[in-house]
Image (cartoon, rainbow, N blue to C red):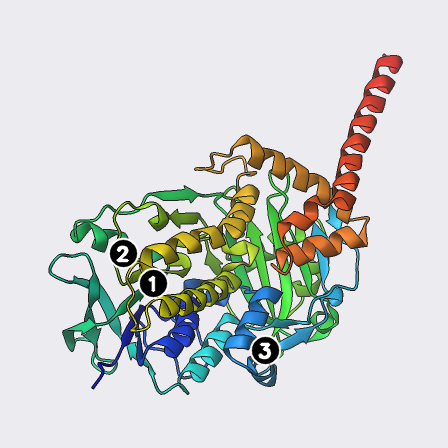
């Protein structure tokens, strides 16, 4: 009788949940070890402190999730999530109000993070080979005698109804997946097994945000969704107002360079009043708040370079924020987690074609290298923005990156007066199109023309100043 194959996932984050959907196709049993106890209804939990804030599902992520969980979109809408035409959303870009256009994008589905997590868990529970091991904290990796292969994890479990009742178990598996987020302990665990921990790149713009939820009534019910971009180094404040399930509006205010939005009511309103457009302030100044103001400041970009390790154990992979975390303000997190899972599926299919008996030899190292290439684009986007802040730390940009940043500034200036350029930019943000489209001749000529216009204006001002002097 053939032995049952088993995969263990550390962490019930979205990255872990998406990965479990994929692993259920390739393993007889999948165990998700989560230190929290999941709520029975959509609600915040300690392990996801950022869940109270705005989350956006980009179109690329939406497509992947619908492939993973057919009908999920309709289920979210049935649960109260809002479906909005992208043209109904106002975007105050770094260069001003962006034009409306007819994008090749589906309607946006707007929801709370708690609703999405709950709906995904509900769908996974329908898989008989996916098991949630709640209240379990992984304390270390188990390895074979030579320590060349990871064989499982050691877990400390606590009882849901009696937290003082604690016991430890060793769980064995063919593959261990760390989806434990930024608090991942894998670097420490690898060191205890005799491996070098990965190098880390950390870039921090000290961005923080504060969120409050309001009842949809009065002027708020007439408000169109608005997104106000930060524009460092000049403009360090932004925000967004979007409807979510439950006839509620979620308002997030954000600030970079430690210009954090306050968490008291008067300070929160005053911060909204100082934004470059009064839209959000006018919508909420007389609105009924139904939650306190919640703050979050863990927004640093962190890349643990497992792909660079000279020695790496078999049967262990790291995904999601456990390997590469982006400043969440750019909205890439959910979509990149879905892309990670999609790549995991593709790599496992190729591995099965290479070794028909389920052998995972060489899989872990190759997967981490491919994952690093996948993360390059969203990472570059995030750090190119965060490096603009005067107080940003950790950024060491080469000449090519600096030139790209300058070029994108020109593109942003062009798009406020050109609907086609705006459409291309939005499709790149939604990861539907490659960033290469923004360097196409038609857009590049307009961007360069913008540069010439700026220089001509500067020369004219200089000439006027000289002649008047």
Among all residues in the image, which is located at the extreme top?
A: 469
Q: Are marks 1 and 2 in contact (CB under 8 Å)?
A: yes
Q: SS class of the residue under badge 3? A: loop
Q: Which comes sooner in the sequence, label 3 or label 1?
A: 1
On residue 186, the disc is 2
Residue 275 in view (yes/no)? no
Quadrant of residue 362 in the image? bottom left
On residue 180, the disc is 1
Q: Quadrant of the N terminus?
A: bottom left
Circle 3 sits on which residue? 245
Residue 342 in view (yes/no)? yes
Quadrant of residue 394 in the image? top left
> In front: 151, or 256?
151
Residue 52 appears at what percent x and percent y? 49, 67
Q: Which comes sooner in the sequence, label 3 or label 2?
A: 2
Q: Residues within 10 Å of mark 1 (few under 14, many from 20)?
A: many
Q: Is residue 69 above or below residue 297?
A: below
What residue do we see at 33% from left, 55% from top? Answer: 365
What residue do we see at 72% from left, 39% from top? Answer: 410
> In front: 336, or 214?
336
Quadrant of residue 341 in the image? bottom left
Q: Is residue 201 above or below residue 123?
A: above
Q: Along the horizontal axis of the image, is 41 left or right of 311?
A: right
Q: Which comes sooner in the sequence, label 1 or label 2?
A: 1
């Amino acid at each position: 009788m053939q032995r049952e194959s088993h995969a263990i996932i550390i962490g019930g984050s979205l990255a872990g949940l998406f990965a479990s959907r994929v692993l259920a196709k390739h393993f007889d049993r999948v165990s998700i070890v989560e230190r929290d106890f999941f709520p029975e209804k959509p609600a915040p939990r300690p392990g996801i402190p950022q869940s109270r804030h705005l989350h956006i599902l980009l179109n690329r992520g939406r497509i992947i999730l619908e492939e993973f969980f057919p009908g999920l979109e309709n289920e979210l809408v049935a649960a109260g999530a809002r479906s909005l035409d992208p043209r109904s959303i106002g975007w105050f870009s770094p260069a001003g109000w962006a034009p409306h256009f007819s994008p090749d994008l589906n309607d946006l589905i707007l929801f709370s993070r708690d609703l999405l997590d709950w709906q995904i868990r509900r769908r996974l529970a329908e898989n008989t080979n996916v098991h949630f091991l709640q209240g379990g904290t992984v304390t270390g990796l188990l390895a074979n005698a030579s320590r060349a292969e990871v064989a499982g994890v050691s877990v400390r479990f606590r009882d849901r109804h009696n937290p003082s009742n604690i016991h430890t178990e060793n769980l064995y598996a063919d593959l261990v997946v760390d989806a434990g987020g930024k608090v991942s302990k894998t670097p420490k665990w690898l060191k205890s097994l005799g491996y070098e921990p990965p190098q880390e790149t950390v870039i921090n713009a000290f961005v923080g945000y504060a969120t409050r939820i309001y009842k949809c009534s009065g002027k708020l019910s007439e408000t169109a969704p608005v997104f106000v971009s930060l524009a460092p180094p000049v403009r360090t404040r932004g925000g967004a107002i979007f409807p979510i399930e439950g006839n509620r509006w979620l308002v997030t205010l954000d600030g970079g360079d430690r210009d954090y939005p306050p968490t008291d009511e008067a300070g929160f309103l005053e911060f909204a009043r100082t934004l470059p457009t009064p839209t959000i302030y006018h919508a909420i100044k007389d609105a009924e708040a139904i939650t306190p103001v919640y703050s979050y400041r863990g927004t640093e970009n962190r890349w643990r370079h497992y792909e660079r390790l000279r020695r790496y154990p078999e049967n262990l992979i790291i995904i999601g924020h456990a390997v590469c975390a982006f400043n969440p303000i750019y909205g890439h997190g959910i979509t990149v987690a879905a892309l990670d899972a999609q790549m995991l599926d593709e790599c496992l299919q190729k591995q099965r074609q290479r070794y028909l008996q389920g052998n995972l030899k060489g899989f872990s190292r190759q997967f981490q290298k491919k994952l690093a290439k996948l993360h390059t684009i969203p990472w570059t986007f995030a750090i190119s923005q965060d490096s603009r802040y005067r107080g940003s730390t950790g950024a060491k940009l080469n000449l090519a990156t600096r030139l790209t940043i300058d070029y994108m500034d020109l593109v942003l200036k062009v798009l406020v007066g050109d609907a086609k350029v705006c459409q291309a930019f939005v499709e790149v943000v939604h990861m539907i199109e490659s960033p290469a489209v923004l360097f196409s001749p038609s857009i590049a000529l307009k961007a360069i023309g913008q540069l010439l216009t700026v220089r001509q204006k500067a020369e004219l001002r200089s000439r006027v100043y000289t002649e008047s002097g």
